[in-house]
Amino acid sequence: MARHIRSPFDAPDPQPASWHTLSHAEAGQTLQTGTEGLSNAEAARRMVRYGPNRLAPPQRRGPLRRLLMQFHNILLYVMLGAAVITAFLGHWIDTGVLLAAVVINAILGFIQEGKAEAALDAIRAMLSPHATVIRDGRQREIEAAGLVPGDRVILVSGDRVPADLRLVSVKGLRIEEAALTGESLPVEKCTDAVDADTPLGDRCGMAYSGTVVVNGQGTGLVVATGGATELGRINQMLAGIRTLSTPLLRQIDRFGRVLALAILAMSAATFVIGVLWRGHAAAEMFMMVVALAASAIPEGLPAIMTVTLALGVQRMARRKAIIRRLPAVETLGSVTMICSDKTGTLTRNEMTVQRVICAGHVFEVGGLGYGPTGDFCLDGHVVDVDRYPALALATRAAVLCNDARLREDDGLWRVEGDPTEGALLVLGGKAGFTRHVAGAAWPRLDAIPFESQHRFMATHHHDSDGESWIFVKGAPERILDMCDLQMNAEGQNVPLDPAGWHRMGAATAAQGMRLLALAYKRAAPAHGRLDFADAEAGYTLLALVGLVDPPRDEAVRAVHECHRAGIQVKMITGDHVETARAIGAQLAIGVGKPAVTGAEVATMDDADLRRTVMVVDVFARASPEHKLRLVQALQHDGQVVAMTGDGVNDAPALKRADVGVAMGMKGTEAAKEAADVVLADDNFATIATAVREGRAVYDNLKKFVLFMLPTNGGEALVVIAAILFELTLPLTPAQVLWINMVTSSTLGLALAFEPAERGLMARRPRPPGEALLSGFFIWRVLMVSVLMMTGALGLFLWELRDGTSIDTARTMAVNAVVAAEMFYLFNSRYILAPVVNREGLTGNPYVLMAIAACIPLQIAYTHVPFMQAIFGSTDLSALEWLKVLGAGMLVFTIAELEKAVIRRLRGTSRPASA
C-alpha cells in the first residue's frame, strides 16, 4: 500500500495549467500517490475536499421567471399598447386577437429559452460514466464521479478519458482530441514534460477529460476533476457568456421607441391644439386622439415579422440549415464576418492520401473522403498502378501494415480505428487491393504495434509462395534510418538517396500534408517472432505518402461567394499553423497574409488583438479562450459575426457570436446546443445559402415596413387634418382598426413570400448600425402617406360637398385607403425596380392571392348588413367604386414615377434595396 507521508491538505494545490511542466515522478510526489494508487480512506478524504468528478449544474431561472421575461420585448409592448387602446374603445374581439398574439409569441420564446443550460448539460454528458483505477494496489472499476486528484487511472482503446490526467506510462497510446483542440488527427501520447507555454494540443504527457482513446493503452494520475478540468473551464466560460441581441431586434427596438415617442408627441400636440386653439371639448378631443393613436400604431408589425422569420426558417430547413432561434434567420443576412473552424467544416474531417512519392515518380491520387474510388495520375494522365512496381507494392504495404477497418453503412464509408490508417486502406482500395484480398493472399503472422517512442509499425506476412515479408510504416525520418535501398521506377532496388527524399518530403509538407513512409524487407524475423531487432536495418524504401484532410469542394465555392457578397471569412482552428495556412490557401482564405497562432494571441492585449483580427484571416492552435476573444474583438469593431464549429472547444465562441452555426452530423452535442443554427449536412456552403435567405428575409421585412407605415401614416394624416381644419372625422376608430388589422395585415403578409431579388449576394453587407428607416425610406413613407391622405380625404370632402351622407363619405374614404393599399402592394414588391412588367405584376402569386382575399372582405364591409351595423358603412354605386379605384391608381402611378426618377438620378435600373 502506498505510504502517505503527508496529506495534500497540508500543501497548496499546484496551478492547473502547470501539470504538463512536471515530470510524472514529480506529479506523483506532488499528489502523494504511488504505484499502488490511493487508499480508499485517502480517496474518501480527498472527495470531501475536491468534491465529485462532475460539472456543477448552473443556477437556473424558474419557469415562471423565464415565462415573464418573454414579455420584456418592445414588439410585445407595442402589441399590448394596441390591445389596451382597442379595449378602451370596447372592441373586445380585436383586443382578444392582439392578446392571443402576445401570448403565442411569449410561449414560443419560452420553448426556445434555455439554450445555454442545454449546452452545459451536453458538456456534462461528455464525462465518462466509469473509470478503471488502482486503489489499495488493486485494479477496480468505479463511477467516474468518484475519481479524486491522485487516483491512478488505466486507459485502453475505446475509453473516454474520465478526468484530466498526467500520463505516467503509455504503450502506443493515441487520443482523439478534435472536440477539445480541433486537432484533425489522433495525438500520439508520451510521458515527457513540456514547457509551460505549450499549447493544449501539444501537451503529449497529458490526457484530457472528455477525449477518446483511439489506440494503445496507458496509465495516468488524476490531476483535475469536475470544474477544474479543461472541459470544466469551457463549462464555466459558457456559463459566463452573455448572449447578444440580434441586429434586427436592436433595429426594431430603436424603431419601436422612436415610433412610440413620435405617436405620443403627435397625439399630445394634437390634443393641445384641438382644446386650446380650436376650442374642442377635452372629452371629444381625447376620443379623437385615441383614434389618431390607433391609426398610427403598426399592430401588424410583430405578427408579420414573426411570420416572415418563420417562413425563412422553413426555407432554410429545406436547404439543410436548422434554425434554433427565430431572429437568427435575419441575423444571418446581416453577417459581415464568418469565423469558421477548419476540421469538419471547411474540410471533410476525413484524412485522404493525395500524393504518393516514389523514386522518380510523384503520383497524385484522386477521390476524396473514405470512399475507395479514385484514379492515380502521373503528369496529369491516369495510370495503371500495376505498371509501376514501387507504387503497386506501396499500396499493398499500406493495407498490410494496418490495423484499421473500412466499412460501408447506408452508402457512407466509415473508418473504425485510426483515421490515418483508414486513409491508407482507402488508398489500397483505389488500387484494387482491399483488406479482404490482403487477408487471403498475404496472411499476417506477427506485428509490432505503433508506439510513439519508436514512431513506426511493422507487420510480418507470408505471400502466396510462402515467402516472408516484413512491412513497416511510420515517420519518414525513422523509416529512412531503417533503409539502405530504394525501389526505382523499374522495380529494382538501388542505393538510397536520403537527400532526395528529404527534399521531396519537405516540399510536400510545405503544402500542409502529413507524411508517412512505407518500406519492406524480404526476410523472416531473426528469432521467429517479430521484435525491434528486426526493424533496425536492411529495408527498401517504397514511397512517401502525403495525407491531408482536404477542403470540401463546395466550401471553396462558398468562400468565393461570401467574398463576392462582401463577407470576410476567417479560419480559426486548433490545428497546426502549417496545415491551417495550406488549407487556407486552397480556400482563398488568408492568401499572402501571415497566420497567427494561439500562443501569439495570448500575448496580445485587447487593443492589439482588435487591430490584428481585422487584417489576419488564419488563426492556428487556437484554444476556446482564444476563439472567444477573437469573436469579441470583431464584435468590438462593430462586425456582425457568424461562428461555425463542431467541437466542445467551439461552444463558448458559438454562444457569444451573433450567429452560432454548429455541424449537425459530426458536431458534438455541446456545440449544437450552444448554436443558433445547426447545419444538417455539415456543409460550409449551406452557410452561404443561409446568408442569402437571411438577406431575403430582411429585404422582405423592409418591404413590409415600407408598405405598412404609409397606411398608418395616411390614416393619421387624415385624422390630424380633420382636427386642424375642424372637419368631421373621416375615419372612426373602428374603421381605422378594420384597415390596420384586416386589410393592411392581410395584404402585407404576401410580402413575406417575396422571392429573393437578383443580385442579392453581390451587395455589400448592410452596416451593423443601420437604422430600419433610412432617409430614403422616410421620404417614401411621407410621400405615400400624403398620397393616401389626399385620396381618402379628397374623396371624403368631395362626397360631402355633393351632399352625400357622412356614412357614405366615410365608406368611400375607407375604401380609398384600402384600394391605395392594394395598388401600393404591387409597388412594394421592388423598392426601386419597376413593377410594370409581367414579373412585377405576377411574379409573386401570394400578392395576387392576398388581393383576391381582400376584395371580398372589402365588399362585405361595404354591402353586408351586419358589417354596416358594426362599422357604419353604406352601399356604394358603380360610379363611387370607380372613384375609389381612381384614388388607388393615383398612388400606384406616382410611386412608379418616383422610382423612375430615383433610378435615373442613381444611374441604375437594378432591383436595389436602397
Image (tube, rainbow, N blue to C red):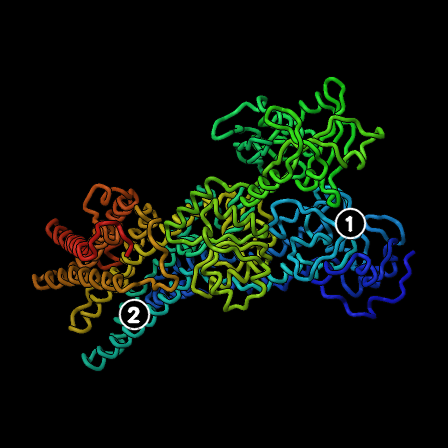
Helix, strand or loop status at disc 2:
helix
Q: Is residue 522 above or below residue 198?
A: above
Q: Nearer the viewer, residue 376 or 293?
A: 376
Q: Is residue 631 above or below residue 410?
A: below
The x, y position of residue 578, in whole percent, is 56, 49
In the picture, which quadrant includes the C terminus?
A: bottom left
- The residue pinned by badge 2 equals 290
For the residues labelled 2 and 1, the Cα–Cα distance comes to 71 Å
Tell me if mark 2 has few (under 14), some (14-19) or many (20+) residues whose alpha carbon lies within 10 angstroms of its own.
some
- The residue pinned by badge 1 equals 131
Left/right placement of residue 303 relative to residue 64 reads left
Residue drawn at x 30%, y 46% as measured from the top left: 758
Which amino acid, by three-letter code, is at mark 2?
Val
Which amino acid, by three-letter code, is at mark 1?
Ala
Q: Is residue 24 visible?
A: yes
Mark 2 or mark 1, whichever is nearer to me: 1
Mark found first going from the N terminus, 2 or 1: 1
Left/right placement of residue 117 relative to residue 890 reads right
